[in-house]
Image (cartoon, grey):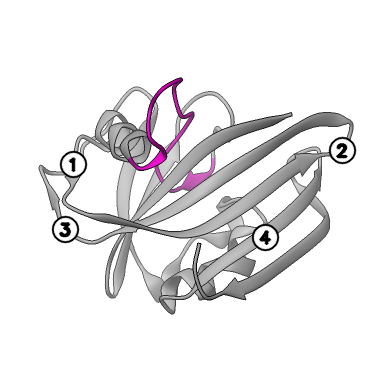
Amino acid sequence: MKKVLTLCLIYQHPNILLGMKKRGFGEGRWNGFGGKVQEGEAIEEAAKREIQEEAGIMPHKIERVGILDFEFKGDPEILEVHIFRGHDFDGEPKESDEMRPQWFHVDELPFDTMWPDDKHWFPLFLAGKKFRGKILFENSDKILNLHLSEVEKI
């Protein structure tokens, strides 16, 4: 069983916009902005909606750069996360009930308070590459298995 989700990162070299998750799944971690794709909603539209809800901004154009399948040991559900990169946007990032946005320099990303898999795929993201991967977690802190590959297209 798969659940389709989005993750959108605003990257204006040398800075990237992350959000501190304030509640729910991933609480207490820095992450991109995203969430569930609603029934009948296009994946790209869901990514734009989520970043608007969580950070108060609307990206002009986003590009799908990755798909990661997350599994958690003992849970049959697979989280299929479509990762998008955006550059320009309307509005000013502002805190929501769910996320507190903050800009980070790419050399100072807070990997110790991000998901453990991020340090593996972020270099591909920052280099403008496209990628696919599968990550198996035990709980949400320990990676049991990780497969990541650069691809030509998504």
Give the image location of residue 69, x and y in percent.
Answer: 67, 48
Q: Which residue type does callout 3 highlight?
A: Asp
Q: In this rendering, which labeled residue sits more in front, label 2 or label 4?
A: 4
Q: Residue at x 46, y 69 (%)?
A: 125
Q: Are marks 3 and 1 in contact (CB under 8 Å)?
A: no
Label at residue 133 = 4
Residue lying at the far bottom of the rendered structure: 127
Query: What label does residue 73 carry, if any?
Result: 2
Q: Residue at x 75, y 46 (%)?
A: 141
Alpha carbon distance from label 4 to label 1? 27 Å
Give the overall secondary structure of the magenta segment: loop
Q: Earlier in the sequence, mark 2 or mark 4?
A: 2
Neighbour tally class for label 1: few under 14, some 14-19, many 20 plus, Cα within 10 Å: many
- Residues shaded magenta: 29-44
Measuring from the top left, give residue 137's x and y in whole percent: 79, 46
State yes or no: residue 42 in magenta.
yes
* Disc with the residue nearer the chain's start (4 vs 3): 3
Residue occupying the point 10% across, 42% down: 91
Q: Is residue 24 left or right of residue 126?
A: right
Q: Quadrant of the N terminus?
A: top right
Q: Which residue is mark 1?
A: 58
CA–CA distance between discs 4 and 3? 27 Å
- Residue nearer the viewer, 49 or 97: 49
